[in-house]
Image (cartoon, grey):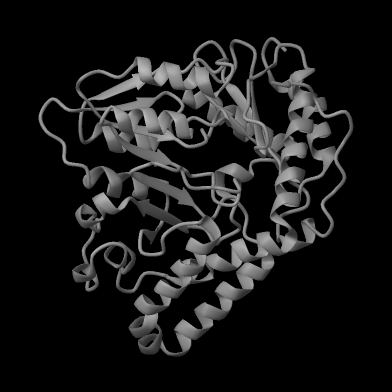
Amino acid sequence: MPDLPAPSAPPAFPGGAALFRLDPAVAHLNHGSYGAVPLPVQQVQETLRAELHADPDAFFNSVAERLVGARARIAAHLGADPDGIGFIANATEGANLALDAVPLAAGDEILVTDHGYGTVVAAAARRAPVTTVALDPHLPDEDAVREAVLAALTPRTKVALLDHVSSPTARLIAGPRLLADLAARGVTTVVDGAHTPGMLAEPLAAGADFWFGNLHKWGYAPSGSAVLAVAPAHRARVRALSPSWEDHHGFPRSVEYRATTDYTGWLAAPEGLDLLESLGAAEVRAHNSALAAYGAGLLAALPGLTALPYTPGLPFRSLLLPPGNAETQDEAYALREELATKLRTRVLIWPRPGGGGIRVCGQVYNRAEEYERLAAALPAYLKGA
């Protein structure tokens, strides 16, 4: 697998920066954490909010049916069954809904990895004993990851809760071969696809029993927009965390209707994926991946930083920092905020004993000089660099 910096800086994406309302004085190199909502999608949501405030009765009395239409548009983009996905707020909610729908008996265990997102892993730990697979970030490829996960299975493993693409280390984990192997062993699979809608041409994890993904990251949807996809065999057991008036319909309407919550983000969410397609989804993905590769290549040339293996084509990359940096969560937060306040640069810093990591993302609003500025200044903020 190639692990070289891009030979030259990728050109700016035409009109990319103008689509967003981001502060131009800040280098926003952390799209993967919170996303950013393009102006056309913001405008659709603002129109929906105006409609709500003009006639609340009409809006809320019709919202359940309108969500059906919005869900169908999202399903078409994702390649999903529109009756098998439901709107949710985020990946953490998806994990809780999915795990609640899996019958667990005394002695059953849930397998997770140490690349998993904290609140998602915590959802598993609240329900059953957890076996954590320590995946060496230097594992070279998807096959090595697959072998490590399978080797950790025990006769008590009932559920495997896996990242589709890991958040800190930016690599594919729940690939189709691994999911097929787990299914053959009778293990229920719950896949955290927080990053894949908009990022991957085929964002669903084929063969997963449950999959959930955020639309507000790479899908350009408003914040708080995500979906849960459930295989037919499990749908009857999915229950809303807070049942409401649509509960008798069952999944997906039962998890979507929440009385007077703000539905405008979900109703506007299809506009984000429509915008991605209008920009040329393949071109956006190629541009974002090239930018992330360029930035990672610059950082990899710095003393003490080590580029990690990656999944080609993804719009983010991770590197290990020198020992003594970001070894705890508090240290990672402190370094992240120092770079934000002093360097005016947003990146993800993740903790790890012996030296944490840094993740950079690429998006259509980014410019090559933002990564160059980070690479030039970063050593001043690191110990041992």
Where is the C terminus found, in terms of image quarters? top right
Q: Nearer the viewer, residue 145 or 367?
A: 145
Q: Residue at position x 59%, y 43% from top?
A: 32
With respect to residue 292, does 60 lie above or below?
Answer: below
In the image, farthest residue toward the left? 106
What is the quadrant of residue 232 in the picture?
Answer: bottom left
Say whether residue 7 is left or right of residue 186: right
Q: Residue at position x 82%, y 26% from top?
A: 376
Q: Nearer the viewer, residue 211 or 15?
A: 211
Where is the N terminus found, in terms of image quarters? top right
With respect to residue 225, does 347 lie above or below?
Answer: above
Q: Is residue 75 among the parts visible in the rendering?
A: yes
Say whether residue 282 is left or right of residue 46: right
What is the quadrant of residue 14 in the picture?
Answer: bottom right
Q: Residue at position x 53%, y 44% from top?
A: 195
In the image, residue 372 lies at what x, y percent? 83, 32
In the image, residue 106 lies at what x, y percent? 10, 29
In the image, residue 97 lies at what x, y percent? 28, 49
In the image, residue 269 lies at what x, y percent? 53, 65
Q: Is residue 174 among the parts visible in the rendering?
A: no
Q: Nearer the viewer, residue 255 or 143?
A: 143
